[in-house]
Image (cartoon, rainbow, N blue to C red):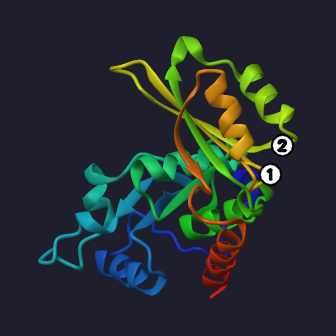
Amino acid sequence: MIAGELLTPDFPYLAPEDSVDKARQLFSDNFVSHLAVVGSQQIEGILPLDIIPQDIDFEGTIADLKADFIRAQVLNDQHGLDIFEVVSKLELTAVPVSDKENKYLGTIATKDLLYMLSSLYAFRHLGGIIVLSMGLRDYNLSEISRIIESNNAKIVLMYMDSDESTGTIWVTLKLDTLDISRIIATFERFKYTVDFQQPSVYTRDETQERYALLMKMLDL
């Protein structure tokens, strides 16, 4: 799942000589807050909707706003998770894609990226979630994996977060099973701190019902 495979078909973009009025119309028609600005097939930046004042001269051009462009884009061979990091940090509703020569190839709408990510097995699979907290020096992926696999389970998704000021890291694990009570007990026996677990109070049937309801909502 790389950027070149995730382009949103026929997604609009702006040229530097386009009017601000045209930008307003494209923002409105496409329900986005960011549009790529492309001149001579080269990406010049991203125009955000919120920099356009209400009282601006609509006959002015996009080039007049160049100083406020967001300088961001992704390469056509970047992975979907890298793209997600870019759009998350900059809170983008769309991000342009280029080749290594900065030639504009198209745009990825964030809503389409999220849909693609949600279709991955790790996100679709119904499973328990465990969050462990520890010092960076205590992090041992092989031991964590061994504990989980010794309880006949597997990791389908894992990510880490950290607090640099304290040196604490949080390891979030999604497993291929909802029956995580024995796994929790094993972690605690090995002196791991379990900050979060799900399911916790809910029974398996209740969790499955909630998951089915969520999937139904996403299909609407």
- Kind of residue indicated by mark 1: Asp
Could you classify mark 1 by the number of other residues whose Cα lies within 10 Å: few (under 14), some (14-19), or many (20 or more)?
some
Q: Do the residues labelled 2 and 1 touch (CB within 8 Å)?
A: yes
Provide the secondary structure element on which disc 1 rests. Answer: loop
Q: Which mark is residue 28?
A: none
Provide the secondary structure element on which disc 2 rests. Answer: loop
Query: Disc 1 designates what residue?
Result: 176
Say which residue appears at 39% left-offset and 22% top-offset. Answer: 164
Say which residue appears at 51% left-offset and 46% top-offset. Answer: 86
Image quarter where the C terminus lies is: bottom right
Query: Outermost residue toward the left?
Result: 55
Q: Residue 120: horizontal and vertical position, in percent?
A: 76, 59
Residue 193 falls left or right of residue 29: right
Say which residue appears at 32% left-offset and 60% top-offset. Answer: 63
Could you classify mark 2 by the number of other residues whose Cα lies within 10 Å: few (under 14), some (14-19), or many (20 or more)?
some
- Residue 44 vertical placement versus 33 (above, below): above
Residue 50 falls left or right of residue 85: left
Q: Residue 47: horizontal and vertical position, in percent?
A: 37, 61
- Kind of residue indicated by mark 2: Ala
Q: What is the total number of numbered labels drawn onto the structure image? A: 2
Say which residue appears at 23% left-offset and 79% top-offset. Answer: 58
Q: Nearer the viewer, residue 118 or 175?
A: 175
Of the image marks 2 and 1, the number of the one nearer the N terminus: 2
Quarter of image, res 50: bottom left
Q: Which of 84 and 60 is in front in this view?
A: 84
Q: Which of 190 and 123 is in front in this view?
A: 190
Query: Disc 2 designates what residue?
Result: 153
Query: Outermost residue toward the top?
Result: 137
Q: Residue 89: horizontal and vertical position, in percent?
A: 43, 46
Q: Residue 200: horizontal and vertical position, in percent?
A: 58, 55
Residue 29 falls left or right of residue 53: right
- Residue 204 vertical placement versus 95 (above, below): below
